[in-house]
Amino acid sequence: MTEGQRRSPGGSSGRPDRSAKAGGGHAGSGPGADQLGALLGRVARGDQDAYAAVYDRTAGQVLGLVLSIVRDPAQSEEVAQEVLLDVWRSASRFDAELGSAAAWVMTLAHRRAVDRVRSEQKAAEREMRVASSAVAYDEVAEAVEARLDRERVRRCLGSLTELQRESVTLAYYGGYTYREVAGLLGVAIGTVKTRMRDGLIRLRDCLGVDP
Amino acid sequence: MRLGGSDPHTLAGAYAMDAAPEPDRSRFERHLARCESCRQEVRGLREATAALAGATAVRPPAALRDVVLHAAGQTRQLPPAVAAAPAAWAPARHRRRPGWRPRLAIVLAGALAAVAVAAGVVVVTFGVQGRLGQAQHRDHMVATVLSASDATMMSRPVSTGGTATVVMSHRERALVFTAADLRVLPTGESYELWLIGPAGTRSAGMVDGSGHGRMVGPMVVSGLAAGDSVGMTVEPASGSPRPTSPPVMLIGLR
């Protein structure tokens, strides 16, 4: 996350030409990252103890992300459960060449959550949602690492332009498509696409994460 | 400055955040297959999104761990992909889980046998009238649902304790319900199943949780309509025409 890595604001996005560089840790590259990848390798061979360890490292993030998109606690737990089982089922498909283990898991989670909210909203679930929203979740605020991550993410989000930040947060935490984001923000579709990309590039550089 | 959608590269950010719906998504994936630097970019952006995810962590309920680890133990894993690797991770959007079907027949057969042995008596509900059917009819219905080509198994924690498992078939418009380790209710209360959907909220019968062993069911629930969910509430033992308490379990029947 040195200045040199940052893209010039606005110019942004140029061609993706970022050279590989050892990252300073976050989800993808922190001290736990390689361990998670190694655990997934064991999970792929059917090791249930390794799976329990993977669960313990990822379930809180998976559920938290799903909750931010799906909102309804009961449904979110369903989706989180599906995601975590997917990790078990498809661990053999994880390829460290294509990215970190944490990113792989969170990509599964995000996609499932988004699929859930974009599938036709079922009247039944809406009806029940009102009644079933009593579950409360503790934020894992006391976990130092989590708090540091949170602060870093907040700081890096703060380094984006307002439009970049809104585009990224609505898409990622809200599960909206870029067309929906454009509608919500009242800006042109092309602008939103560009801001999403520029915003993520800036975040990536600020966070010092590495593929 | 790129405007509009002419330059596919601009979609990398939206794509990395699952914010590019079809047909943009497929179009971009075709482009990715030909563009190594784009794949590299998407990888980096995905790492950034994983960091965003990290900031949302919550403490999951303890029951979730048991349910997930237990379900994993009963779920067949996919073999490694041997075909040409995909351009970037594009985890399959499987709505059905073909790998589960042969397995779930075994799981359910085991569950049914356990129930038959442990309980001796099995209450089965056919449709909304909740009339008792003959054992053969029930077994036939159970077998029909389990062997349906679109049979799907879903397992969910019950918020008050235990796990509910449903095998459903849209084609047969029916599901088989079982549950394990439900909290024993005080006398005068009982679990009731509901179908909830655009077709209305219909009772699917009382769950006989009368304390025989740890399994309840199987119950066959027929008359599924499009968009239904199955839910379970705690009701007076005589049943209620409408749910009178929040659901302790809810499964969307996709």
Image: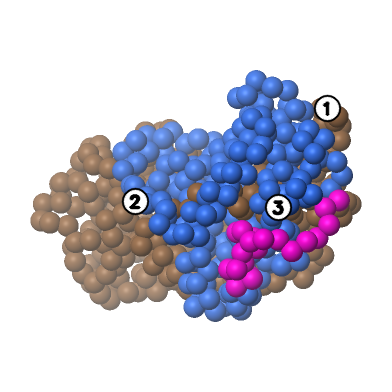
Chain colours: A blue, B brown
Residue kind at label 3, given as amino acid type: Met
Tags 1 and 2 in contact by the CB under 8 Å rule? no
Image depth: mark 1 or mark 2 in front: 1
Task: From the viewer's side, name the closer residue of B27 and A32.
Answer: A32
Residue hosting label 3: A1
In this rendering, is residue A161 above or below A206? Answer: above
Residue span colored magenta: A17-37
Residue kind at label 2, given as amino acid type: Met
What residue is at 53 percent from the left and 69 percent from the top? A54
Question: Can see residue B33?
Answer: no
Residue hosting label 1: B3
Residue B125 in the magenta stretch? The answer is: no
**Direction right: furthest residue:** B34
Q: Position of residue B199 (x, y in %)?
A: 41, 33
Q: Position of residue B167 (x, y in %)?
A: 45, 58
Q: Give the left or right position of residue B4, taking residue A147 as reference.
A: right
Residue hosting label 2: B249
Mark 1 and mark 2: span between their CA atoms?
48 Å
**Pointer 1 chain:** B
Q: Secondary structure at mark 3?
A: loop
Q: Are marks 2 and 3 on the same chain?
A: no
In this rendering, is residue B210 above or below B171? Answer: below
Q: Are marks 1 and 2 on the same chain?
A: yes
What residue is at 61 percent from the left and 41 percent from the top? A157
**Pointer 2 chain:** B
Task: From the viewer's side, name the closer residue of B129 and A34.
Answer: A34
Q: Secondary structure at mark 1?
A: loop
Residue kind at label 1, given as amino acid type: Leu
Q: Give the left or right position of residue B82, taking residue B176 as reference.
A: right
